[in-house]
Image (tube, rainbow, N blue to C red):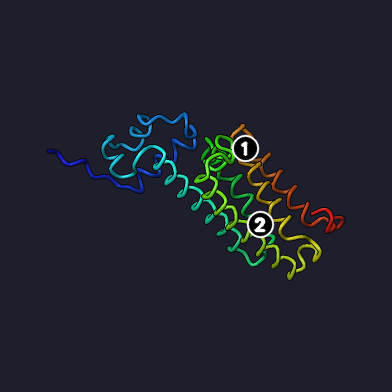
Amino acid sequence: MARPKEFDRDEALQKAIGVFCEKGYAAASTDELMRAMKISRQSMYDTYGDKRELYLEAFRRYVADSVSEQIGYLEQTSSPLAGIEKMLLAFAIRAEREGVVGCMGINAICEFGRSDAAVSSLGDLESDRLNAALRKALRRAKVEKEISETMKEEAAARFLSATLAGMKVAAKAGAERQALESIAHFALRGLTSPERTEDDL
């Protein structure tokens, strides 16, 4: 009996992520996934299990890598506010350079809502990780006098997360880099405006 052809698991998983980003879960057929991953049906089932298990592994990798990248931007600069700006603008630059066929995280929210407990749990885990990093950056920004000491860190962190999610949706809808950058800058002005009070955020 012939042995299944060996392949690079991580490389194949990245190809699956590309399909799920473009198609979502339901619209991505097993045949499409196998062609993109360049593996046989048997190899797919032996390695990842069924389509759902492949999706969950791909989703776990995608959201973890995305959040790690965003946290990296927050921690790359000595200025906390500059780190937040870099995180938002980096997405605008990448969207122009690479094109954005879809964000797997946004697709999952639109497709599943809260109906799939496993997907929701993975998304919540990474969302909490990003929000924790944003709260940390905002606390540092208060110490550095870059934002008001009265600003609510939790609300501001969720505002920034929602801004990033909105930029991803706008990019998928065809927004150009200039439009995405304007969204980012508007959000940053919301953090630094002298009129902004505790009740606003």
Q: Residue furthest left?
A: 1
Mark 2 or 1, nearer chain start: 2
* Amino acid of disc 1: Val
Looking at this view, is 45 or 31 the one in front? 45
Q: Quadrant of residue 41?
A: top left
* Amino acid of disc 2: Ile
Screen quadrant of the N terminus: top left
Q: Residues within 10 Å of mark 1 (few under 14, many from 20)?
A: some
Q: How many numbered marks are there?
A: 2
Q: Which mark is residue 169?
A: 1
**Location of residue 32 with respect to 58 vertically, above or below:** above
For marks 2 and 1, give the CA distance. Answer: 19 Å
Residue 4 appears at what percent x and percent y?
21, 40
Q: Secondary structure at mark 2?
A: helix
Q: Secondary structure at mark 1?
A: helix
**Residue drawn where x is 64% and y is 35% of the image:** 175
Q: Which residue is mark 2?
A: 84
Q: Which mark is residue 4?
A: none
